Image (tube, rainbow, N blue to C red):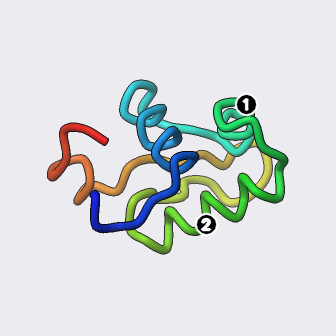
Amino acid sequence: MAGLGLSERQKKAVRFVKENLKITNTEYQKVADIQKREASRDLTELIEKGVFIKRGIHGVGVHYVLDKRIRKGSKGT
């Protein structure tokens, strides 16, 4: 995972998901102390980098989980 160039905020999101199995945009806003727009941008980037998979369609039902390739391959962040 080190080669993905994750920001410190994004690393917080990954740690949160490793401990809690999923994260929502609202949870990420609280964890990283950022606004919704920044959280959405970061979460989209984590999907594009193959770190997270988006579950749900839109709104309150959406959450993010670790991509299975990340779950298998990394112990720490």
Q: Secondary structure at mark 2?
A: helix
Mark 1 and mark 2 in contact? Answer it, CB < 8 Å.
no
> Label 1: which residue?
30
Q: Residue at x 66, y 39 (%)?
A: 28
> Label 2: which residue?
44
**Of the pair 16 and 77, the residue shown nearer to us:** 77
Gap in Å between the C-alphas at discs 1 and 2?
17 Å
Residue 44 in the figure: left or right of residue 18 = right
Residue 77 in the figure: left or right of residue 45 = left
Of the image marks 1 and 2, the number of the one nearer the N terminus: 1
At label 1, the amino acid type is: Lys
Tell me the quarter of the picture where residue 4 sits. Answer: bottom left
Tell me the quarter of the picture where residue 31 sits. Answer: top right
The 10 Å Cα crowd at callout 1, few under 14, some 14 to 19, many 20 or more, is few
Residue 1 x/y as whole percent: 27, 58
**Of the pair 1 and 66, the residue shown nearer to us:** 1
